[in-house]
Amino acid sequence: MHRRKRYHYERQGKIPKKPSGEEPRIAETISRKLQLSEDVLASAPLLMGYGPHRLCLENYRHIIEYNDDLIRIQTKMGRIHVKGERLVIAYFRDDGMCIMGNISAIEYHH
């Protein structure tokens, strides 16, 4: 019976094919179906600015350096440097943090 089933699928073209380079990547397919950004699925850093005094960041690995004029953060995609004056980390968790102060620049380093 197992042979008949396989033969039946072969005749109808339902045997799964090996993936090719032309097929969409898994992240693209999932993001399209769930209507989510690929960046979110890939754990890319997500920055949300609220004026010049508040910046929230999601998907970071760890804090490299922290002082009142520079905060350096390691992400999966590289480093983010937040420059300014009187910078403080208002809160941080495993998945996100919020920086407050007079933010003058945000730099990305690969």
Image (tube, helix red, strand yellow):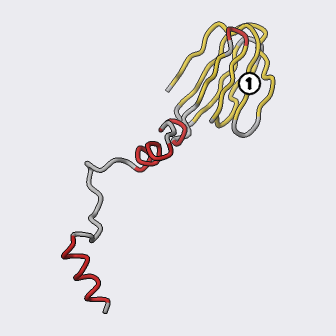
Residue 72 placement (x, y as % from top left) = 66, 23
Instruction: Tell me if residue 47 comes above or below residue 13 in the rendering.
Output: above
Instruction: Tell me if residue 89 comes above or below residue 103 in the rendering.
Output: below
- Horizontally, residue 58 falls left or right of residue 34, namely right
**In the rendered structure, which amino acid carries the disc numbered 1?**
Cys
Q: Nearer the viewer, residue 12 or 63?
A: 12
- Horizontally, residue 80 falls left or right of residue 9, namely right
Q: Residue at x 22, y 69 (%)?
A: 13
Q: Secondary structure at mark 1?
A: strand
Which quarter of the image is occupied by the N terminus?
bottom left
Q: Nearer the viewer, residue 6 or 105?
A: 6
Which residue in the rendered view is the most extreme toward the left? 11
Q: Nearer the viewer, residue 63 or 37?
A: 37
Residue 40 placement (x, y as % from top left) = 55, 38
Residue 86 quadrant: top right
Instruction: Tell me if residue 67 comes above or below residue 38 in the rendering.
Output: above
Q: Residue at x 49, y 40 (%)?
A: 35
Q: How many labels were placed on the picture? A: 1
Instruction: Tell me if residue 100 comes above or below residue 61 in the rendering.
Output: above
Q: Residue at x 52, y 33 (%)?
A: 77
Residue 56 quadrant: top right
Q: What crowding class fits label 1: few (fewer than 14 Cα within 10 Å), some (14-19), or many (20 or more)?
A: some
Residue 16 quadrant: bottom left
Q: Which residue is mark 1?
A: 98
Q: Residue at x 59, y 23 (%)?
A: 80
